[in-house]
Amino acid sequence: TLGDISFISSTLDNDFENLLKDLENAGNNLINSFKPSFVSNASLTATYNFNRYGLSQENTSFLRLFLEGGGTFGNLVMREILSDTVEFYRYVKINGDFRRHYRISNHDVIAYRINIGVAVPYGDNQVLPYEKYFFAGGSNSIRAWVPRRLGPGSYAAFDTLANELVFDDSFEQSGEILLETSIEVRRNLFGFINGAVFIDAGNVWTIREEATRPGSKFKINSFLDQIAIGSGVGLRFDFSFLVLRLDAGVKIYDPARPSGTRFIWDDGFKSGAFANTETVVYNLGVGYPF
């Protein structure tokens, strides 16, 4: 069991602060995550590693369970000391990460991963510390999206003046619910160079309706239609002491696009707000994604 206490004071860029205020006026309380704050938490992590995951030439598995509680005792005590202008957080965060390597020959491995998480804020401000949110996209997530820009849900930016969707990945997209899974076939090409073909799927969602991000809330009857799918190929340069990785991902199904144009082979997939979006997303990483 680990404990952590931190006091955060930040100075915001004027443009970003104005954006947060605009969101607040529209009902989004994300600005609370960037105010001076006091954060206390305690966490518990349990791991199960079968056959030295990632190192053995046999079939291997890895399971990590993580539980974190924020607030409670530390916040109750510090509320009597610190000013009311300081944000206090209360939340529960749960995350489960399962990984499996299945060796099909001396040169070929099938690897897959399932990563699920939920974080529930229950304090007065109804938000999480920003670093406690979940994000999707990037070299260790859904690789057809740039880092931390996927989701939440089917949300897409909308220009109310022009009355149309606009493509905007300027800001990270956070959520309280995470679901992502990946599978890839890895093969040694020659020497220290390995190749991979992969499919990633997943998204993040919010637990409450947000007027500023319609379509972001997790709903049992619609979340399957909001799971993004990407595929691609990659190279891994294994120097034994260091693995450098280059992956190229392509969107197969994008839930942010209008219904009927979400698959890459649908008419309209590359039109409107998404006409000039990237076709291939390149990710450079250190180590294997899972």
Image (cartoon, helix red, strand yellow):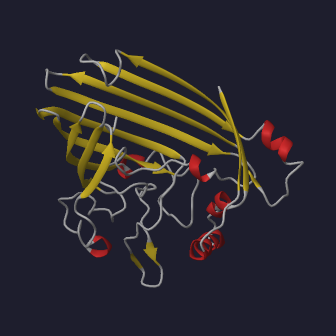
Depth check, front residue: 207 or 171: 171
Give the answer, above or below, for where 69 lies relative to 23: above
Side of 197 relative to 143 (left or right): left
Q: Residue at x 55, y 67 (%)?
A: 212
The quadrant of the rendering that contains the N terminus is top right
Query: Quarter of the image holding residue 15?
Result: bottom right
- Estimate the x, y position of residue 42 in percent, counting from the top left: 68, 33
Side of 239 relative to 71 (left or right): left
- Estimate the x, y position of residue 32 in percent, counting from the top left: 68, 60
Give the answer, above or below, for where 184 lies relative to 152: above
Q: Residue at x 44, y 62 (%)?
A: 155
Furthest toward the left, the residue is 190
Give the answer, above or below, for where 136 lies relative to 71: below
Side of 87 relative to 169 (left or right): right
- Estimate the x, y position of residue 91 in percent, counting from the top left: 67, 42
Query: Quarter of the image holding residue 114?
Result: top left
Query: Quarter of the image holding residue 185?
Result: top left
